[in-house]
Amino acid sequence: MRLRLPERVIEFPRRPLVMGIVNVNDDSFSGDGTLDFGEALHQARSQVMAGADVIDVGAESARTNRAAVTVAEELRRFRGFLERWDEVWQGQEPRDAEQVWPPVLSANTWRPEVVAGVLELGNVELVNDMGALPDDRNARACAAHGAALLIMHSVGEPKVAHFQQRWPDVMAALEGFFEEKLRQIETAGLPMDSVILDPGIDFAKQREDNLTVFRELERLQKFGRPVLVPVSRKTVIGEVLGLADPTARDAGTVACMSAAMRRGAQIFRVHHVEAAWQTVKVLSALG
């Protein structure tokens, strides 16, 4: 299995990729967002030095109790970071021989106007689409630029809470969703080896749904695509541990990473890159 990016290919199996999170916004749920581009670049550089293979930069919070920013504002925030991306890794050395180098730059966004604008700015190799791909516009944009596309499972519009969503069989729903979206992507002209799947932990899912996804994650291996688990500091971890503060959930995050790695996850999206890097490195050594 391989992941095709604009000018390179990442081959699997390999040690799972660690995706660090940088929020160029002022309302991140974990309190680490910033509108200062210098600070955002510093965060990204620190994560890369800690072993991050991918940096996922977002300019709008996914929190459902916050209004969406305008397209123009989201693009302004992206531009201030993307234009200085090389400062993050140039002059640095990879932490070890397995770190993807230079690190992959991922743009976390979903509106087609923003996706198109971000890809035009350059440097972005992966679009992390949290919008559940309601149509093929983002797939066509990625195909036109050679970028990879991450599809996240959810229902309805992003930034709208779906607390009442119930799934008789959440894994069957995920399988049906990805079957449909992969057909849509193929029709749009995006190669299958440029696609990543994300089960959407905490998105339109309740506690038991999320736990089921972790327990049965291996069912998504049928699609032959890398599976990203956005595990970091999730609400379900707080519910299990009784921890309201997201920043107190890093040990629980490591536990979920360990379970997901045994079930075939290839990429982890995390806030605490150092802990995640140590986790995947040790688990990979143990075999």
Image (tube, helix red, strand yellow):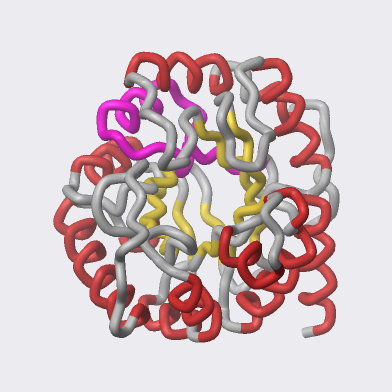
Image position of 141 (left or right of 120): left
- Residue in the image at 43% along x and 32% along y: 66
- Residue in the image at 62% along x and 46% along y: 54
- Residue in the image at 44% along x and 80% along y: 221
Q: Nearer the viewer, residue 171 or 203?
A: 203
Image position of 58 (left or right of 281): left
* Rendered image quadrant of residue 238: bottom right
Q: Nearer the viewer, residue 228 or 241?
A: 241
Image position of 177 (left or right of 266): left
* Number of numbered discs on residues: 0
Which range of residues does the magenta coloring cover? 103-126
Q: Is residue 114 magenta?
A: yes
Compared to residue 38, the image places residue 95 above or below, namely below
Can you see residue 113?
Answer: yes
Q: Position of residue 70 (x, y in %)?
A: 34, 19
Image position of 39 (left or right of 106): right
Q: Which of 63 and 214 is in front in this view?
A: 63
Can you see residue 6?
Answer: no
Q: Is residue 280 magenta?
A: no
